[in-house]
Image: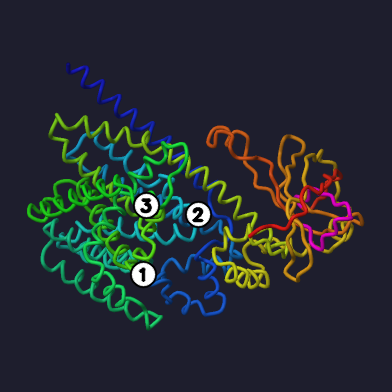
Amino acid sequence: MHKFAALAERSAQICAAVAAFVFLISGVVYLYLGRWTVTNLDFWRIYDFCLNHTWLESALLKHNGHSLFFPSFFWLTDLRFFHGSQQPLFFAGLVLLFITVALLLILVWRDETVGLTAKAMATLVVIVGNFWMARAPITASGGFNSICSLVTASAGLAVLLLPKMCVSSAWSSLATLIVVCVGFVASFSFGTGLAIWPTLLFLAWCLRLPWRSFVPLGVATMAAILIYQRLPPPHSADYRVIQAAGSAGLALVAQLCRLAGSPFFYATSGWHLKPLSAEAAQSSILSLWCGGAGLAIAVVAMVLTMIRRDLTKSTLKLVGMASVTFNFVAMALVIAGRADRFRAQPFEVAGPRYLFWSTLFWTGLLLMAIQCVESKLWLRWPVYLVALALPVLTFPEHYRHGLNARWGREAAEWGAVSLVNGVRDEVLARVPFGNLELGYRVAGQLRVRRLDMFADGLQDWIGLGEANLFGERHKPEKVKGRCAVTALVHCDNGAPAARVVGQASRHGDSVPKTLVIVDPTGVVRGVARSSTTSRFISRVFYLGKVQRNNFLGYIRDYNPQLHYAVRSADDRTLSEEKIPVRVGMTNPAKP
């Protein structure tokens, strides 16, 4: 019996390690290949302000009621030194995500009250909770991930150092200073970052910190709230938010339950052949009851912890309780802050972007469960089996969101190609823009300053002859493929234009990244870009559902009587081979 128990323990540890490794690798691959590579959504409005105001004004302004002071320096630096490329922002957000995971795992592996199996299960839960691709609406965007992961990384560092505040030494003062500083970083990185102050005060009580430790935390809490209220715009909706939350009453409780239970809905949705709608998520009984049960368990656990004040015994319980408390308050702030919007559009309460917080809430609950059952042999294996089943149950939605993120990246890049060509293709531009008129206005500023999709200068090629642009840089590349005009649009000056879609490859089965579309006289009339994926990645991670050699481009001043051709132009070297452009459709594109 003893040998069987030892074998079961070792098997569970190996399974947890393998599952964590697979989930981590797949998550990083999906994030990298599905990242936003061009300016997207809210950042058009943010950049519109940044490009027309000083860096200090840009950092201090609240956007939609959120102070983005600290993360704003990521994109202000990017605009100043990296031409607005989204690549540095993505890596900044990814590094912060890894820092968050590392801080949580430090606390997990420091615990001396649990065994190796419990630590392995906790590690698996932390990795799945942080790299689940259902959170991709936040984590796949460099800007959004920089904001939210800066909050979680700051909170993780504060929780790590909080117990050190009880030591009567110089280290105690240093720990207090760092905790207060990272508390301000979290507070002024995003609105939900304000949840760090009630979390720290709650944990300080449960850790039995001396009363003198509450003074700097209390003063910092009041200072953060007062400063937050004073930040521009001066006539913010903060007070109206409180009034709206108060008038909503019990409806807020149901919304909070649905938000908290949404990870269960999305995990279940992954097992359906077709993804379920946002309206179905909002009306889901599963979300309501699971969220209600999770919140009830969290409240009971928090009350018992406040009474017992025993968080000093286990760092695993500390990190679990910290995650539950912080994300509980963060979700409450989301519900209160968007009460009016949720009343007008109830389905938004189950929006995928809120999974960033609700998933971490359940991660904390599982961590506490793993610690709690360590001394209860009859409960250990049921909890361990739940932890081992977690990556299996969530992987279908993990894969689906990874695939959708890859398709979303491609659609956003196609919209950027229309901007580079100076074409108003509202069907494709709507993907990165959201608000078309705002997007086109800010895109004009990016073009003038040669930022983001305009940094490579491809827009300058249009209207130049092959000889002037490429000189003698020609070589045979065995380029082959096919393409056709699929829709008629118009240029920004009102002239006719055509959307060209096709496939191209060259020697060695590689795919040209940059292509030009030339008229019979050799004048470049448009540029095209491809979105490439290796054959191995496509087969292993996307099951062959991602096209490897698609490209899209435009013909400015389109004349259907002329014969156009596509040529590869990577490394500013023109291929000798041409792909003729067929006239496949002459109908205008529908918005």
Range of magenta residues: 555-571
Of tags 1 and 2, the one toward the viewer is 1
Q: Position of residue 422 (x, y in %)?
A: 72, 65
* Amino acid type at image mark 2: Phe
**Color encoding of the figure:** rainbow
Q: Earlier in the sequence, mark 2 or mark 3?
A: 2
Of residue 298 and residue 431, the one placed in the foreground of this image is: 431
| Tag 1 secondary structure | loop
Task: Quarter of the image for the C terminus: give it.
Answer: bottom right
According to the picture, the residue beneath numbered tag 2 turns out to be 91
Instruction: Say whether residue 546 is left or right of residue 509.
Output: left
**Residue 475 image-quadrant placement:** top right
According to the picture, the residue beneath numbered tag 1 turns out to be 188
Q: Is residue 420 above or below residue 573?
A: below
| Tag 2 secondary structure | helix
* Amino acid type at image mark 1: Phe
Of residue 353 and residue 463, the one placed in the foreground of this image is: 353
